[in-house]
Image (cartoon, rainbow, N blue to C red):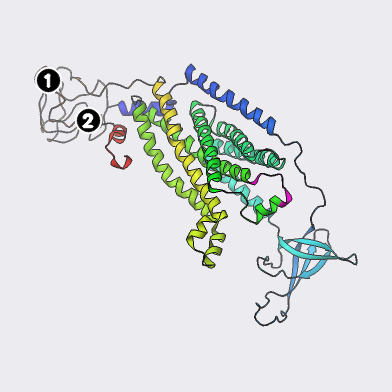
Amino acid sequence: MNQAGHDHHHHGAGPAWPASARARRLTLWLLVPAVLLTVIGMLMLWPRDAPRSTEGEGPQRAFGQITAITPEACPEVPEGEAPLENCGTVTVRLDDGAEIITEVPGGPGAPVVTTGDDVVLLVLAEEDGSRSYSISDHQRSTQLWLLGAAFALAVVAFGRWRGLTALAGLAVTFGILLFFIVPAILDGRSPIMVAVVGAAAIMLIVLYLTHGLSLTTTIAVAGTLASLAITAILAAVATAAVHLTGVADETSNYLTITQGDVNMQGLLLAGIVIGSLGVLDDVTVTQSATVTELALANPAYGFRRLYGAATRIGRAHIASVINTIVLAYAGASLPLMLLFAAGNTPVSELLTSQLISQELVRAAVGTIGLVAAVPITTALAALLASRSPRHTPPAAPFAGVSAPAGSAVPAGPAGSAGPAGSAGSVGAAGSTGPSGSAGWSGPTGSTGPAADWAGPAATAPAGGAVPAESGARRPPEDPWAAFVDRDDTRDR
């Protein structure tokens, strides 16, 4: 009966399988080539002639705070046009101390301002040499810094050291995006190659930084690399089959005009690969850790049981993640969907338009890569766990164990349970075992929880052990075994 406590002790004491020489070799065999290939790829694709912003380009901006707003009556407009709203003047104190007066911003999407707001103004040079000002937006730096601090505090407060490493990984991700991926694409490099190499760099650094240098993380890395390759190939095939050009909105149109060297179709593929990475590492780490915990809790499980149990968990995970992906893309395209709906566009035309088709391809390809990540990662983890040395499963409790001569079976009514710490099952009320009899008893000094074994009144034959088929109820089976062995028709 102390077996449960024994297993619990090992559960908190060590990993699912000891770090063997084979595990260390496997980690190095996968990690070293992956790192070398990623470094070589980054050196070959590193931007050298990427266009840089020139100081002074674009309209000059000024910053200030609104000190007063003077409303005025709006002028009349011709019949049939929408009347003007929010007319008047705004007094703004600039950061250099000067005060200027400009009009209240108006028109669709114009910022709504009140006294005390910090605003951004465009400075326009007039023909006579004077300057005019126009409020273009609010200043948001202070609010965003506060929100970022709250985000970091929440992550560290809950995740502690793991949360701190997650924030470091987030910084690495932004660094690779801003200093390698974006400049390399602007430099005319192949967007899909840049995306694959950049995603591999992000994954290798972030996963090991966040989850540690372990076999579990290495399996997640291998599963993510394989799934990324599948996603990239499917994305290339799908975009070619659907005839997507990558130019579907005003932003991409403007980019083709200002940066003609950028391959827009390749940029679309790069976006699909990078967008899939965030969900892929979530699934692969979860599946690898799941197999680790299953192997720890059930040392006797082989490949089939580990793979079956972890795959069931993966199916539940995938079912929710797929909906998350679709909703994320739908939320990003919601304004466009509203525009099409307001224009009474047929659904068939809506779904086959360039922009919506692009989002459908993103969602479908990303989901297929995500689904592929589950069996790949689970199979790798289960294969290694089943071949690694683990704790030997203990013998079944109470198998052939007999009570010492002259021992007494605790008294209790038929079918009642023995108290905590009792040795043996329960006989009839007040009954005792004869000399040399053997009742249901645990090893010497063992303890058992209340309501352990119960059964009708029964007495063992002299000198013999009570067989497993006696009136006492059989010990409960392993719940994990029942979980993986059950005949679940939903999984077929």
- Magenta residues, as a range? 257-264
Front in this rendered view, residue 211 or 384 = 384
Disc nearest the viewer among 2 and 1: 2
Res. 305 image quadrant: top left
Query: Which residue lies at the image location 22% right of the left edge and 35% below the top edge?
Result: 451
Q: Give the answer, above or below, for where 10 lies relative to 157.
A: above
Dot label at residue 437: 1
Instruction: Please indicate, yes or no, whether residue 286 appears anywhere in the rendered image.
Output: no
Front in this rendered view, residue 453 or 445 = 453
Task: Say what amino acid the circle numbered 2 marks.
Answer: Pro
Q: Is residue 373 magenta?
A: no
Q: Which of the image's four quarters has the C terminus?
A: top left
Left or right of 386 on screen, residue 166 = right
Q: Residues within 10 Å of mark 2 (few under 14, many from 20)?
A: some
Residue 360 screen position, x and y as percent:
51, 50
Q: CA distance from mark 2 to mark 1?
A: 21 Å
Instruction: Please indicate, yes or no, whether residue 130 appears anywhere in the rendered image.
Output: yes
Task: Say what amino acid the circle numbered 1 marks.
Answer: Ser
Q: Residues within 10 Å of mark 1 (few under 14, many from 20)?
A: many
Q: Check disc 2 and report the residue beneath it.
A: 475
